[in-house]
Image (cartoon, helix red, strand yellow):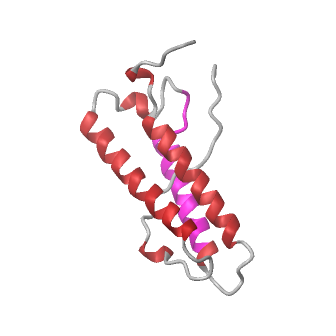
Amino acid sequence: MEVATLEDAEPIFELALACEDLYAEQIAKLEGDIESNDGVMLTEFSERFAAWAAFLGVFAHPKICLDRKLRHHVSIQAQVLGLLRIMETNLAFSIASTPRSLSITNSVSLRIGRTSRTEGN
């Protein structure tokens, strides 16, 4: 069994992936609601999140990903993680809320997109 070291940890990747999953879950939940613009707004936020993630390399190969780039910049990494935790909390809250009236405009609108992590590339 392989033991991961602290240097191998990818907390930004993992949190961003969780946020991406929450975006997808909430968008799917709102897809059929034609009375609300929330699904459209959330899709836009998700796309912005994807652009942010792609630009910074959040889902890039482990040797060049954002976690790797920030491993010696703890304060910057902590800020990114803090913002991702806020986003995750808000998305989780919105999923637990009533599907009809979702207050997306008050949510954090950081974006990360989902790309598959391929080992060995």
Give the residues drawn in magenta, as a range.
40-61
Residue 113 covered by magenta stretch: no
Does 39 sit above or below residue 108?
A: below
The residue located at (35%, 32%) in the rendering is 70
- Residue at left offset 67%, top offset 72%: 30
Q: Quadrant of the C terminus?
A: top right
Q: Is any part of residue 14 visible from this angle?
A: yes
From the viewer's perspective, is residue 113 above or below residue 30?
A: above
What percent of the width, then of the height, locates residue 11?
43, 36
Q: Is residue 59 above or below residue 33?
A: above
Q: Is residue 118 left or right of residue 18?
A: right
In the displayed structure, does residue 28 sit left or right of residue 6? right
Image position of 13 with respect to 94: above or below: above
Q: Quadrant of residue 33?
A: bottom right
Residue at 64% of width from left, 58% of height from top? 24
Would you say 9 lies left or right of 48 here?
left
The residue positioned 30% from the left and 47% from the top of the image is 79
Q: Residue furthest top?
A: 1
Question: Principal SS element in the magenta part?
Answer: helix
Front residue of 46/92: it is 92
Image quarter hosting the N terminus:
top right
